[in-house]
Image: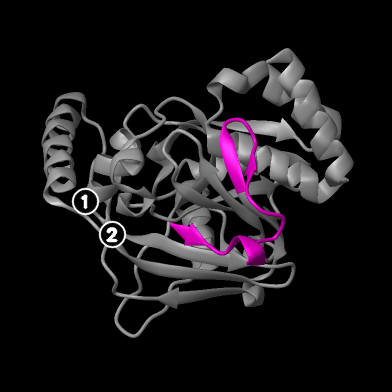
């Protein structure tokens, strides 16, 4: 994945568990996606690693009843951003390629260059409920990565249907509906808060914020019948308050995925400003 550092909103920052590549507040009309059929660069060594990883992971998945499906995904090839616009260059990749590179062998970037990684583009959201909680979930033991950890609601962007277009905002809304049962009519328009990379897998993730016109009791009741309700074993609400978010991170740091940490911090940056963001990171570095 490449980017133009001279056209990046603030430049890439090392934030501990994740890299912060872009930060801002981008409405749907300010995020432009270009599709290309350009394949992922590779070589026989990398393909052997991918095939061997897939064989072992599918065997383990069968034994443990874990979910594993080689779906088509969208690879982030390049990005550029300024204060008013974010541009994403997207191409095709598969879940098998993701699992064999970012998911289990992210170090391949040091041997063959970062462009050999699958880099599927993820989407995650700080969902603020009507009763002022930020909705997170604990991932099921049956998912492929970060099983049992606290993670935001979201997913991975998929390629368009024939004559369609790639829309990360649509992907996010669909994932929220499928995992929680919250309909699009009950959500505010999402705002994209930035682009981050999990430092362990180096997978790129767009972080969003949106409000839902539902409280936690109704979400818990309605999510039982959601199509993908099995992806989470429980909902983890975080009180939407500056001090409460920092306290939650401090007490649950080892349980949070890097994307969950990024989601909470970027939500706080957007809601409570750069002073809160700097103070929160400084305090957390001193106690964790």
Task: Provide the residue span drawn in magenta.
Answer: 1-20
Q: Nearer the viewer, residue 272 or 1?
A: 1
Residue at 29% of width from left, 35% of height from top? 105
**Of the numbered discs in the image, which one, if any, rests on residue 70?**
1
| Residue occupying the far top of the picture | 287
Dot 2: within a 10 Å radius of its alpha carbon, few (fewer than 14), some, or many (20 or more) residues?
many
Asked whether disc 1 touches disc 2, contact meaning CB atoms under 8 Å apart, the reply is: no
- Residue 225 image position (x, y, % from top left): 44, 46
Residue at 47% of width from left, 40% of height from top? 224
- Residue 191 image position (x, y, % from top left): 68, 62
Residue at 65% of width from left, 74% of height from top? 30
**Of the numbered discs in the image, which one, if any, rests on residue 155?**
none
From mark 1 to mark 2, how far is it between C-alphas?
10 Å
Q: Which residue is mark 2?
A: 93
Q: Is residue 214 left or right of residue 157?
A: right
- Residue 39 image position (x, y, % from top left): 26, 66
Question: Visible in this render: residue 235?
Answer: yes
> What is the count of numbered marks?
2
| Residue occupying the far bottom of the picture | 163
């Amino acid at each position: 994945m490449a980017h133009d550092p001279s056209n990046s909103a603030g430049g890439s920052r090392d934030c501990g568990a994740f890299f912060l590549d872009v930060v801002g507040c981008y409405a749907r009309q300010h995020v432009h996606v270009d599709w290309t059929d350009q394949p992922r660069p590779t070589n026989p060594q990398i393909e052997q690693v991918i095939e061997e990883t897939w064989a072992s992971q599918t065997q383990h998945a069968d034994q443990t009843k874990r979910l594993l499906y080689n779906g088509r995904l969208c690879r982030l090839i390049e990005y550029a951003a300024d204060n008013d616009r974010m541009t994403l260059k997207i191409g095709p990749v598969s879940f098998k390629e993701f699992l064999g590179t970012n998911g289990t062998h992210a170090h391949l970037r040091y041997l063959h260059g970062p462009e050999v990684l699958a880099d599927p583009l993820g989407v995650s959201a700080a969902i603020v409920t009507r009763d002022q909680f930020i909705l997170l979930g604990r991932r099921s033991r049956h998912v492929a990565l970060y099983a049992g950890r606290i993670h935001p609601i979201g997913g991975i962007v998929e390629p368009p249907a024939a004559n369609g277009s790639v829309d990360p905002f649509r992907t996010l809304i669909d994932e929220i509906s499928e995992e929680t049962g919250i309909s699009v009519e009950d959500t505010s328009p999402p705002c994209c808060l930035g682009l981050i990379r999990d430092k362990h897998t180096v997978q790129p993730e767009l972080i969003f914020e949106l409000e839902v016109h539902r409280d936690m009791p109704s979400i818990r009741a309605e999510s039982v019948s959601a199509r993908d309700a099995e992806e989470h074993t429980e909902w983890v609400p975080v009180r939407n308050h500056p001090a409460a978010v920092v306290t939650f991170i401090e007490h649950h740091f080892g349980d949070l995925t890097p994307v969950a940490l990024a989601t909470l911090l970027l939500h706080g940056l957007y809601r409570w400003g750069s002073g809160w963001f700097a103070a929160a990171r400084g305090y957390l570095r001193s106690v964790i």
